[in-house]
Image (tube, grey):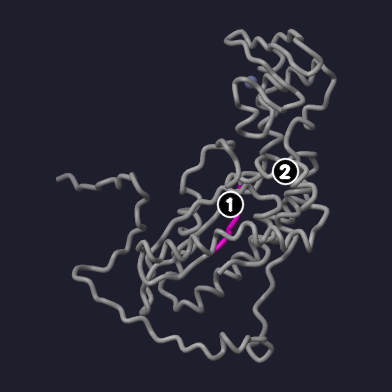
Amino acid sequence: MAIGASIEGVNSVIRPVICIDATHLKARTIGVLLVAVCKDRNEMIYPLAFGFANSECTESWTWFLKKLQEFDRVMSELKETYCKVYDELLAVGVKKFSRLHSPRKRYFSMTTNIAELMNSCLLAVQKLPITAMAEFIRDLLQRWFYNSWINAREMSTYLTTFADEHIKDRTETAYRCEIHPIHFNTFKVDDKWKETTVDLEERSCSCRQWDLYELPYSHAMAVARFKGVSINALAFDLYTIGFLKHAYEMGVNPVPDPEFWDIPDAIRNRIVLPWKKKILPGRPKKLRIPSAGEKRKLQSCSK
Ligand SMILES: [Zn+2]
C-alpha cells in the first residue's frame, strides 16, 4: 500500500534512500507489517509504503521490494504530469538525485531507525484487522502530510530548517579558512587542520563532504564568501523550501464510500482465500524483529 502523495514526493523531492523494517501483527490474521520510509530534506521521516505479509521471509521481502522497484515507471508518469520538474531533475542529472543510479554514496548516514520509528507509531493498532489498520495508516498519513505541508509553508528561509542550521553551524569554521585561488573556479582551502581543493563548478571538495551530503561544508562556504557567491546557492536545489513543499503538496484523501469505488473486473473477480496459518510452537513474538547485526539488550533482575 503506497499513498499517491508519497509516490509523488519520493520521485521528485525526497532523498531516494529507503529504509525498510518489519513488525509482527497481533490480530487474528497474524503476519507482519513491512514498512518502507525515507527522509525528506528537512530530515523528517517520509512514509513511503506499507505491506502486509504472512511472515517475514525471503518471499515476503522479495514481493515488497519488487513493489518498491518501480523507479523508471513512476519517472515516466512524472514526466507526463510534471514536465517541468522532470526536465529539471534530468538537467541536474539522474546520478545526482538517485542513489539507484549513483556511482557513490552521497547522503547522510542512515540506519533503519526511522523505519523502526514508523513501526512504533503503529504499535497501538497491531491488534486491529488489516483493513482497519490500513485505514489507520491512511488517516495517520493524511495528518502527517498536512502538518508537514503547513510546517514547510511556515518556513521563512530559502533552504529547509535543517539545511539552514547546517550552514549556520559551520559559519564560524568557514571564517577561519584561508583561501588560495588555483584557477577561476578552483581554490586551495586551508582550515588550519588540513588543506583541501574546492571546485565551485563541479560542486566538489576534496574532503568529499560537499559531494556526499549535497550541502556546502565550511571549505565551500569559505570559497563562496571569498568569491561573493551566495552560500545558499551552493546547496542542491532539493534542499530549498519549494521542493520541500512539493513533497507534501498532494494531500492524502479519505477513502470514498464503497459504492463509489471503481473496481476493475480482474480485481473484482479475484478470489482471495484466507491464509492457511501454521501455528508455531512457543509464545507468539511480541517484540520488534531486530535488524541484521543488531544486538538486543538483555535485561536481568538483580536480587
Ligand atoms: Zn571540504
In the rendered image, residue 74, in percent from the top left (x then y), is placed at 67, 61
Query: For residue 210, what is the image quadrant?
Result: top right
Position of 3 with respect to 30 (left or right) is right
Residue 116 image point, x, y percent: 45, 54
Q: Which residue is mark 1?
A: 45
The residue that mark 2 highlights is 238
* Ligand 1 within 8 Å of the CB at mark 1: no
- As drawn, is 194 to the left or to the right of 83? left
- x 59%, y 21%: residue: 207
In the rendered structure, which amino acid carries the disc numbered 2? Answer: Leu
Q: Amino acid at mark 1?
A: Ile
Contact flag, marks 2 and 1 (Cβ < 8 Å): no
Magenta segment: 44-49
Q: What label sits on residue 245 in the rendered view?
A: none
Q: Relative to 81, say whether 235 is above or below.
A: above
| Residue lying furthest right | 228
In the rendered image, residue 76, in percent from the top left (x then y), is placed at: 71, 60
Label 1 packing within 10 angstroms: few (<14), some (14-19), many (20+): some
